[in-house]
Image (spheres, helix red, strand yellow):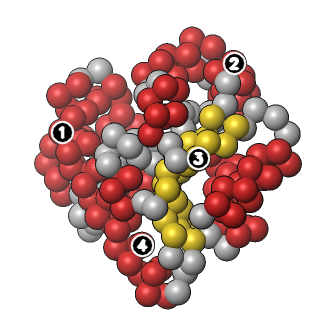
Amino acid sequence: MKVIGLTGGVGAGKSTVLNYLEEHLSACVVQADQVGHQVMEPGERCYAQIVELFGKKVTKNDKTIDRKRVSDVVFCNEEMRQKLNGIVHPAVKSRILEKIQEEREKGCKLFVVEAALLLEDHYDAFCDKIWYVHTDKEIRISRLMASRGYSREKAENIIASQASEEFFFSHADYVIENNGCPQDTYRQIEEGINKL
């Protein structure tokens, strides 16, 4: 089984690449964000620690964690953000490693893990290749404004808070340029798989 780590800035079009890999190349796809939501569910490995850290005020009536309340706190409190990451990130990584092992045992040939902080959290240690989805900044801004309703300022601030293009380029084994038509992106995905 080959494991690809997929990364790229917000609005780069990672979902387009993931969907193609899953639908056309039978890849098993896991997104760290979704796993992060799972490990925060009641009874899961991070739930009690998060409620202890933030207090009962972050739980809804159905006992689930109100992620908006949590994000409101960590948005303006760096210490709390780091504490939250210290709880969630190791649990997410551990869950993903378990999933990789499960899929390997099932005979899966291609596993793709997508994470915004793939390199920062050292996922490259267990990936065969790191793919970077690159999209010009202006295109990313207009995508975020159109798809998420962000203001230009909010889109620019989020992009500015992420790792630089130079950082991604210097750590990637393969780069997909996602500036043009989808067919061009799909062709690059196929080329990347052939190089595996």
Q: Are marks 3 and 1 in contact (CB under 8 Å)?
A: no
Q: Which secondary structure, mark 2?
A: helix
Closest to the camera, between mark 3 and mark 4, is: 3
Quote the CA–CA distance across marks 4 and 2: 35 Å
Q: Could you tell me the amino acid type at mark 4?
A: Ile
Quote the CA–CA distance across marks 4 and 1: 27 Å
Q: Are marks 4 and 1 in contact (CB under 8 Å)?
A: no
Q: Are marks 4 and 2 in contact (CB under 8 Å)?
A: no
**Is 23 drawn above or below residue 73 in the view shown?**
below
Q: Which secondary structure, mark 3?
A: strand
Closest to the camera, between mark 4 and mark 1, is: 4
Image quarter of the C terminus: bottom right
Residue labelled with disc 1: 83
Q: Could you tell me the amino acid type at mark 3?
A: Tyr
Q: Residue at x 29, y 30 (%)?
A: 74
Q: Which secondary structure, mark 1?
A: helix
Quote the CA–CA distance across marks 1 and 2: 33 Å
Q: Earlier in the sequence, mark 1 or mark 2?
A: 1
Q: Which secondary structure, mark 4?
A: helix
Q: Could you tell me the amino acid type at mark 2?
A: Glu
Q: Earlier in the sequence, mark 3 or mark 4?
A: 4
Q: Tell me the tag on residue 166.
A: none
